[in-house]
Image (cartoon, rainbow, N blue to C red):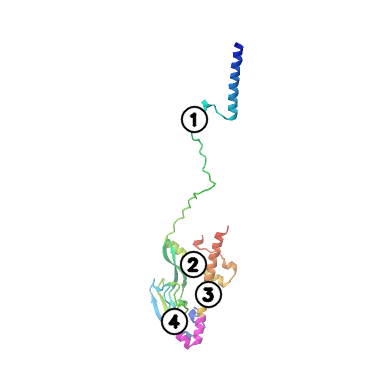
Amino acid sequence: MTNGQPELMSGLSSDEAGRVLALGSRVTLASGSVLFRLGAEADGVFLIERGRITLTLPMQIGGREEDVLVDERLPGQIVGWSGLIPPHRFTLKATSPLETEVRALSRMALLDHFAAHPDVGYAVMRNLAAVIGQRLQVFQAMWLREMQRMVELRRP
Amino acid sequence: MVMFLMVLCLSMFGLAVTCLAFAAATGGIPSGVQNRVEAQPEKKPALALPKPRFFVDELPAPVAQPRVPLEVLLAQIERHVRLEQAAAESFLVSPTPQSLHSRTMSPLMH
């Protein structure tokens, strides 16, 4: 969250941000609920207002498929940006490890609003690009650290 | 006549001694002795030689690793991911080769 605003609303006035948020609806997730599943169709994004969302990917451990933590999102952050980016399929599984409130913003409602208010759409999509870019850089660094360890293991 | 027989006996004795000496020198064994040797049961060498190790086809058994319970392993993976993510975010704040390859305290790496 930046200056009290969700990361997706950074740079918008409080009125503009309020109008975007009003497009969505609040969803309360019980502890252990699945917000979305890997491979499911993504028709919107979720803004976390309270609680926590864990993002996992399946991994084979001891012959069993286990969900392994990949990322964790906190209030003010968004999950499910695949809802705004083609091909609109979730590439992770999102669950709430504790009771969590999210604001669900549908793609159609957002795109209609952005078409009517291009400056708002530009700001929101720029914020979204920043979120995606930051996560890409984090995972690049994580991947390279693992590669470095692999090289060290193979070094004679 | 007696002298002739004595010379003949000495000659035969000398010939026998020469044959034995020749056989001993060349490794041969007189036939009578050889039969006795063959009649004896074959004895195995008392000292067993070690197996040749030029081509080892039996690798030593790997040291058995203690099996980590699934819950513990999942917790270790989760801790590893959190630590690696924190290290990666720290690298993004000040991107240097040192911060990229900073050491980890992850239980999976120790």
Q: Is residue B5 left or right of residue A33?
A: right
Residue at label 3?
A: A134
Task: Give how far apart the Cα atoms at labels 2 and 1 are.
Answer: 77 Å
Looking at the rendered structure, the kind of residue marked 2 is: Val
In three-dimensional space, the C-alpha distance between marks 4 and 3, rounded to whole angstroms, equals 22 Å
Do residues under tags 3 and 1 come within 8 Å of each other at their CB atoms?
no
The chain to which mark 2 is attached is B
Do the residues at pointers 1 and 4 share their chain?
no
Q: What chain does mark 1 sit on?
A: B
Q: Which mark is residue B81?
A: 2
**First in sequence: mark 4 or mark 3?**
4
Residue wearing tag 4: A107
Q: CA distance from mark 1 to mark 4?
A: 101 Å
Q: Quadrant of the C terminus of chain A?
A: bottom right
Name the chain letter of the residue that bears numbered label 4: A
Q: Depth check: B24 or A150 in front?
A: B24
- Residue type at mark 3? Gln
Residue drawn at the location 57% of the way across and 68% of the way down: B100
Q: Are marks 3 and 2 on the same chain?
A: no
Q: Residue B12: give x, y in percent of width and height.
A: 59, 19
The three-letter amino acid code for the residue at tag 4 is: Arg
Percent of width and height locating residue B104:
53, 64
Task: Look at the numbered discs 4 and 2 and tell me whether their residues touch, using CB distance below 8 Å.
Answer: no
